[in-house]
Amino acid sequence: MTMSKRLCATLGLFLLPATFAVAQTTADSRTIQVEINYAGSGTVNATHKIYIALWNSSDMSGGPPAVVKSLESKKGTVTFSNVQTVPAYVSAAYDPTGAWDAQTPPPSGSSLGMYAKNPPNPQPIDVAPGKTVKVSITFDDSARVP
C-alpha cells in the first residue's frame, strides 16, 4: 500500500465516526420556535427589546434561564436550537426602560408573558429528538413587574 493510500485509509477511519457523530447530533437536535405578538402600548425597537427566555423548569424564578433571545419588533419569531432539556418552558418580557440587558430579573414596569394554556401556570413544551415545535405567546401590558 502506498503512503497516500495508507494516509487516506487512516483519515477515513478517523473521519467516519466524526461524520456519524455530526449526523446523530443533527438527528437528536430539538428546536423550539416561539412566535411573539406583543399587543402592549410600549415601543419596541433596538433599545426597547422583547426578551424571550427558555427555561428548564416551570419555576421560572428558581435560577437563570437556559437561553435568552431578543426581538426588536412587536411581532416576530425566535428559534431555540439544540434544546437540551425537555419539557422546556418559555416566557417573554418587554423592556420599557431601554437599559435592561436580560442578565438580571426584569425591571419594574416590564410587561410579561409566557406560553401557557392556563395562566399563570406555564405550559410545558415537549420536543422529540430531531423535531421542531412551534408555539406562540401573545401578551400585553396587563401583567407587569411591580
Image (cartoon, helix red, strand yellow):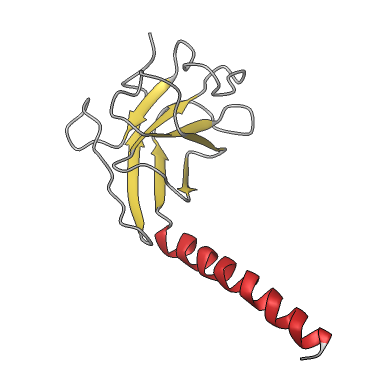
Residue 140 in sight from this viewpoint: no
Residue nearer the viewer, 7 or 142: 7
Who is closer to the viewer here, 133 or 66? 66
State the residue lying farthest toward the left. 118
Answer above or below: position of 68 versus 6.
above
* Residue 76 location (% of width, % of height): 48, 46
Up the image or down, 125 lies above or below 49; here it is below
Q: Quadrant of the C terminus?
A: top left
Residue 137, by quadrant, is top left
Q: Identify the residue at the far front of this view.
A: 1
> At 53% from the left edge and 40% from the top edge, which residue is drawn?
73
Question: As drawn, is 115 to the left or to the right of 104?
Answer: left
The furthest residue to the bottom: 1
- In front here: 21 or 87? 21
Q: Is residue 80 left or right of residue 120?
A: right
- Residue 139 seen anywhere in this rendered image of the structure: yes
Q: Residue at x 63, y 71 (%)?
A: 15
Measured from the top left, where is residue 108 in percent x and y? 46, 10
Query: Left or right of 138: which side holds 19?
Result: right
Residue in view at x 53 percent, y 29 percent: 43
Occupied quadrant, residue 86: top left
Quadrant of the image for the N terminus? bottom right
Q: Residue 8's x, y, as percent? A: 73, 82
* Numbered label tally: 0
Q: Residue at x 34, y 54 (%)?
A: 133
* Residue at the right extreme of this rendering: 3
